Image: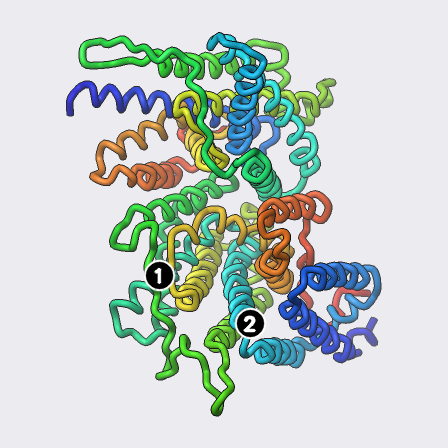
Amino acid sequence: MNARVTQRPALWPAFVATAAVASFAYLFLRAEAQWEVAALAAGAVVALLVLGRTRLGAVVGSAWGARPTPLAWGALLAALVVVALFAEDHFALLMIATVLLYGVACLGLTIQFGYAGVVNFSGAAFFGVGGYTAAVLATHTALPHLLVVAVGGVLAGAIGSLLVLPLLRTRGHYAALITVAFAILFKTFLEVNDTLGGPQGLKVPGMRMLGWSFNDNILVGEDVELSFYLSYAVFSLLLLAGALVLVRRLERSWLGLSLDAVRIDETAASVFGFEVARWKILAFTLGNVLAGVAGAVYAMMTGFVAPASFTIAESLILVSIVILGGVGNPVGVLAATALVVVLPEKLQVIQEYRFLLFSGFVILVLLFRPEGLLPRKLRQYLPGWGRA
Amino acid sequence: MDLSLLGQYVLNGLMLGTIYAMVAVGFTLFFGVLDVIKFSHGDVLMVGAFTGLVAYLGLSELGVQSNALLSLGVMLAAVLLIALLGAAMARWLVLPLRGAPPINVLLITLMAGTVLREAIRLFYPAGANPKPFPRLLPTDSISFGALTLRFDSAILIALGLASIVAVHLLVTRTKLGLAIRAVAQDSETAQVMGMNFQRVVLVTFAIGSALAALAGVTAGLYYNEINFGMGLLLGVIGFSAAVVGGLGNLYGAILGGFLFAGLQTLGAVWFAVPAYKDVFAFAVVILVMAWRPTGLIAEQSAERV
């Protein structure tokens, strides 16, 4: 036992795994022919099954648990390499950035639902608050765009605080209703409000930062023109990295422990002196801020916002991503985001049937693997701790 | 405002309230026996309306001319088939998730609802377009001074209310109802007493879904148009009505249904832009929840720790 605690697991299997995931992402995004896409998807399923059945998965997992810092830098580097490889490809970069930004929003939901147990069925609405804030502020004011993005997050948090009082007083299905009602209210409000563009929505100017315009292609030398999405992809990647660090730190800290206590048993937690209201407010607001920030960047990237993108159906997709990935596991959430966003785009055959297949798939997961694809593990404060 | 317009608003509100109450009663029944929210309820309603339409087309093909017979056939087909569908969903989607977190049940039924919606959109001939629903009820009207009452609205409201009363009587006056209430109160004790838990649950889901099918046919007959997405908003409104009224309580569901319809009507009269009526109604719902966290007719709950 002692030997295990002191022994540092080897890092190289985890690095190899990161490289494998990155190469897979590259190949998958590059694949054009439908049979290639299908073969790659099937290959991934087989690889995951093998990983689950053998000790390989555990080895990689324990390396991550023991020495996350070098591995996290490695993962960031790998992601940057993938982004760089697609430097001239608009579509691939757009998809990468979309996955990254949705990932940020879903991490927000993870804090709310996975840690504090506050269900939020209006995630897309808070994403939309960020988007509309960006549209209005970037069009009508000269605020620096980094600040616009931040204000988008703050405003999402502030609007979310309108729901805090009813959310704190209710539980379970009653609380679910409040966010469901808000999601519909928000979308209907946008549709009928002419100042905010009505059903057509608003145009959003592209992002400018320190004199750097995100919406121009990048010229390198004379004849190499890099896609303008490259700026957004890198920015989103940094945003996601920041959000991941935040969520990881939060989970590891006493804050995360308190959130867990509140989620697992509210009554018992309050008996032990936890201020349930405080933790719920913290989680709910923080989650909405993340969604708002992601929404603001997403709006600037796509160039327009419309109510149709922020319906309750979109919110439900966000919730199913969180459950699909494994409630409370940020890595699982990212994998699920990639799956949900990219697969339908790549498999054009299923384009028409994607909602049908997606819903069917979620039903199967809920029936046969209710804890999600990558279930959350117990915290490991010490490497190798708790595994005798 | 002149009297006839006011009368129109009241009638329309009553009609909406009846439909909402029918949907809400289903939600409250399911919550009663299993403590679950079956979010596919609105889409089940939509499938009910389409079943009715198919039955109408089939019967007309067979040469049935009488409107009365046709209406009866449409309603029977919808009610019976959807009762089966409801029971099947309970059997294979809801019951296997007993013991899982409630959000999982909510999500799985939600996804089942999406499957139904998408299946109709993709596989019903030209399912993405709205479908005309036949006018089967007499459209004559009688006037009381300025107020005009159309027969079809009157029949539909009466039918809806009658079906709710029937369900209420079934739950309060029959042996089956006793079993449903027993399972709702304490499913373990009910099982110890020899009740067939699964059968009671399936029957409850069949009854609730049948009511939704009837609501779907009612909506079709009233608006003379149905589409694959009609269940989404109706389901959410029915859910809101059931929750605002107080889950697990039949009177609460009825109260919630009419309250929501009243709010929408009020919103439509009040605001210069009538489209704000839904914003208004849902905002009031959120406020009501802040005021009475377990609904207007509060759920009796004591938590064991």
**Horizontal and vertical percent position of residue B264:** 32, 32
> Where does label 1 land, which residue?
A155
The circle on residue B225 is none
Task: Report the number of discs.
Answer: 2
Measuring 38% from the left and 55% from the top, which residue is drawn there?
A306
Q: Chain of mark 1?
A: A
State yes or no: discs 1 and 2 in contact (Cβ < 8 Å). Answer: no
- The 10 Å Cα crowd at callout 1, few under 14, some 14 to 19, many 20 or more, is many
Residue A67 lies left or right of residue B106; in this view the side is: right
As drawn, B150 above or below A387 = above
The kind of residue on which mark 1 rests is Leu
As drawn, A9 above or below B1 = below
Say which quadrant the N terminus of chain A sits in: bottom right
Measuring 26% from the left and 51% from the top, which residue is drawn there?
A194
Residue A272 lies left or right of residue B17; in this view the side is: right
Estimate the spatial distance between the alpha carbons at disc 1 and disc 2, rounded to whole Å: 22 Å
* Depth check, front residue: B250 or A226: A226
As drawn, A170 above or below A80 = above
Residue farthest along the left direction in this orientation: B1
The circle on residue A245 is 2
**Element on which disc 2 rests:** helix
The kind of residue on which mark 2 rests is Val
**Horizontal and vertical percent position of residue A38:** 71, 59
Of the numbered discs 1 and 2, the one sitting upstream in the chain is: 1
Measuring 35% from the left and 73% from the top, which residue is drawn there?
A147
Q: Same subunit under labels 1 and 2?
A: yes
Picture quadrant of residue B148: top left
As drawn, B39 above or below A61 = above
Measuring 69% from the left and 27% from the top, which residue is drawn there?
B188
**Horizontal and vertical percent position of residue B197:** 70, 24
Residue B213 visible to an observer of this rendering: yes
